[in-house]
Image: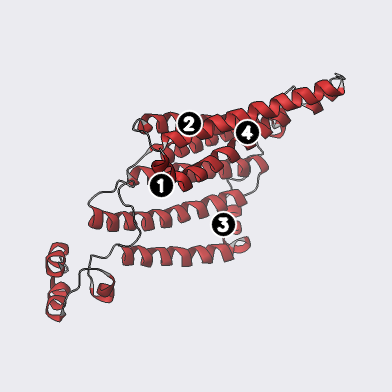
Amino acid sequence: MIPTNVVAILAAAVFCIGVFGLLTQKSALRILISVELVLNAANINFVAFANHYGHADGLVFALFVIAMAAAEAAVGLAIFIHLFRHMHTVDVTKPNELRW
Amino acid sequence: MMRWLDARLPGMLLLAATVLAGFAALVGTWMVQSPWSWGSMAKAGLDLAPWLENLIGFLAVMFGFLVVVAVAIIAGAFTHMVLSQRAAVIGSLLVAVGIFGVMAQAIGATEAFQADGVGEAEDFETLADGLFTTHVIAFEVLGVLLTAAMIGAMVIARPLGSPPDSDNYDTRIDDEELESVQRTSDVDANMEGGS
């Protein structure tokens, strides 16, 4: 079986890749993918520590995080559709006002 | 010189405060965890003269302060320079690698997680029990959240100038056009009719 700290370091790496993507990417879709990476790093940690302690609560919360990520992706994509209709781009550096 | 400073001062102050807080946290972590910290010195039986301890502490704090000031100035300069794209990528890479370094060090230093896990959590009965008894309130709240997100996504992604709140847009349409909107619900037709 894989030691827990190896899995935790994997989760840290995925989280940092997500943070890097959040800081560098300009396309809204890539930013959304980066947010998913961050959330799934948390999922890896949930599952790893659920296995470490033998509790199923971590798995339950991983399911909650997946559902919440789905809701967040739906709302995010809807906002991007709206953004594209107004600005004809999904480059997040282009819109500079909230009044649409 | 002063004009761009005036225009960008709030953003630069915010950026500098963020960078300062981050580096203060990093320096604080380093000072607590480094082998040259005072706790480690005392543990190792290294009894320095008080003035030398003060000098080392002063130099460490000054070094951290200089790093913070330098990074804040550079980061503030990057906000208005043309080469900010490459600089932002490099800075972001540094931030990501720094976060990963701190996390990996903390994970590696925690001895409880070096061992294999218990590994009894892949029991589906326990999982269902947790989902539908212990955390059933959270489960139901999550259902409400998903429903609200679905409705919100539908409302946000609605075509422009749709009937329910067409007054909120600049593209005002009259009743005749409203009927055509309801018939076709074509985005381009709405744009032409409004403007």
Mark 4: few, some, or many residues within 10 Å (few <14, many ≥20)? some
Q: Which chain contains the residue that carries disc 1? A: B
Q: Of tags 3 and 2, which is closer to the observer?
A: 2
> Disc 3 to disc 1, how far (Cα)?
56 Å
Are dots 1 and 2 in contact, CB under 8 Å?
no
In this view, the residue farthest toward the bottom is B175
Is A45 or B175 nearer to us in this picture?
B175
Q: Is residue B28 above or below residue A72?
A: above
Q: Are marks 3 and 2 on the same chain?
A: yes
Mark 3: few, some, or many residues within 10 Å (few <14, many ≥20)? some
Residue A1 in view here? no
Is A67 or A16 nearer to us in this picture?
A16
Amino acid type at mark 2: Ile
Q: Which mark is residue B26?
A: 4
Q: Point out residue A23 in the picture as x, y percentages from the top left corner.
A: 43, 39
Q: Which chain contains the residue that carries disc 4? A: B
Q: Which chain contains the residue that carries disc 3? A: B
Mark 4 or mark 3: which comes first in sequence? Answer: 4
**Residue designated by label 2:** B74
Name the image quarter holding residue A79: bottom left
Amino acid type at mark 1: Ala
Are dots 1 and 4 in contact, CB under 8 Å?
no
- Residue displayed at 48% across by 48% down: B10
Mark 1: few, some, or many residues within 10 Å (few <14, many ≥20)? few
- Give the SS element for disc 2: helix
Amino acid type at mark 4: Leu
Q: Point out residue B52 in the picture as x, y percentages from the top left corner.
A: 81, 20
A97 vs A68, left or right, is left
Quarter of the figure that contains the N terminus of chain B: top left
Q: Of tags 1 and 2, which is closer to the observer?
A: 1
> Disc 1 to disc 2, how far (Cα)?
17 Å
